[in-house]
Image (spheres, rainbow, N blue to C red):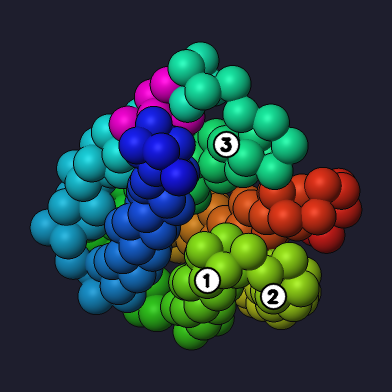
């Protein structure tokens, strides 16, 4: 392999490293945003919001590298699918980070929260989302389409927990009208976490496209 092609493949590997690094940052944001909510930790919530710029910058760098490879290398077949796939994955990772920020804003903006913030289902949804994301990146880096398919099955559990938390919160609001503002905010948190699962499923679909050159709807 000549030096030109070696540099090309090194940059392809760099794309996977970018994806892994961004996913780790996003996973931390999910964890910290829900921890801040449960602990009523406004400072931690503000850290999540501030650190989102780091995620955005990393995604931008990854996109720039993708554009460079598309413009200068004119990749074909599997390499082309990989670069296009990484571009799509970057969009989903950035959106997951934004959703974690939306969760953090609930804590940052409402400092007078009560025990309703301790709804146990919400941390469980976040945990599943982080596990899904971790397994998704393993599938991406190893080129394992079957693992990507398996990962999406966890989304059924997230959807079930979402419905359960939504119903519990609605009952709580009806029975305690004085917490309607807080309860409504938690309904939005519940929705944000459910959407995280959907974006991870999008990433899994992209991985299958990258590996097998076919599109599957898994969400």
Distance CA(mark 2)–CA(mark 3): 20 Å
Q: Is mark 2 on a helix, strand or loop?
A: helix
Which percent across, then down, holds residue 162? 67, 69
Q: Which mark is residue 84?
A: none
**Could you tell me if the residues under marks 2 and 1 are in contact, i.e. CB atoms within 8 Å?**
yes
Q: What element carries label 3?
A: helix
Judging depth in this view, the residue of 139 and 155 nearest the camera is 139
Q: Which of marks 1 and 3 is nearer the N terminus?
A: 3
Distance CA(mark 2)–CA(mark 1): 8 Å
Q: Residue 83 carries which label?
A: 3
Residue 33 lies within the magenta run: no
Judged by its main secondary structure, the magenta piece is helix
Instruction: State which quarter of the image contains the N terminus.
Output: top left
For disc 1, the neighbor class at 10 Å (few under 14, some 14 to 19, many from 20) is: some
Would you place residue 215 above or below residue 40 in this image? above
Magenta region: which residues? 61-68
Give the residue at mark 2: 147
Give the residue at mark 1: 138
Front position among marks 1 and 3: 3
Instruction: State which quarter of the image contains the C terminus.
Output: bottom right
Which residue appears at 57% of the width and 68% of the height?
142
């Amino acid at each position: 392999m000549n030096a030109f092609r070696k540099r090309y493949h090194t940059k392809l590997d760099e794309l996977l490293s970018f994806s892994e690094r961004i996913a780790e940052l996003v996973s931390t944001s999910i964890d910290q945003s829900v921890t801040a909510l449960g602990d009523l930790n406004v400072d931690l919530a503000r850290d999540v919001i501030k650190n989102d710029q780091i995620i955005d910058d990393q995604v931008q760098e990854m996109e720039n590298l993708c554009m460079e490879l598309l413009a200068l290398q004119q990749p074909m077949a599997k390499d082309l699918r990989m670069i296009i796939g990484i571009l799509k994955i970057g969009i989903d990772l950035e959106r997951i980070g934004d959703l974690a920020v939306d969760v953090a804003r609930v804590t940052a903006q409402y400092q007078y929260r009560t025990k309703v913030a301790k709804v146990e289902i919400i941390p469980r949804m976040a945990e599943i989302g982080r596990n899904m994301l971790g397994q998704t990146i393993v599938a991406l880096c190893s080129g394992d389409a079957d693992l990507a398919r398996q990962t999406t099955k966890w989304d059924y559990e997230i959807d079930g927990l979402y419905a359960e938390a939504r119903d519990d919160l609605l009952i709580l609001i009806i029975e305690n009208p004085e917490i309607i503002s807080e309860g409504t905010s938690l309904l939005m948190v519940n929705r944000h976490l459910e959407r995280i699962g959907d974006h991870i499923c999008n990433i899994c679909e992209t991985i299958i496209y990258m590996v097998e050159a076919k599109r599957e709807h898994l969400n």
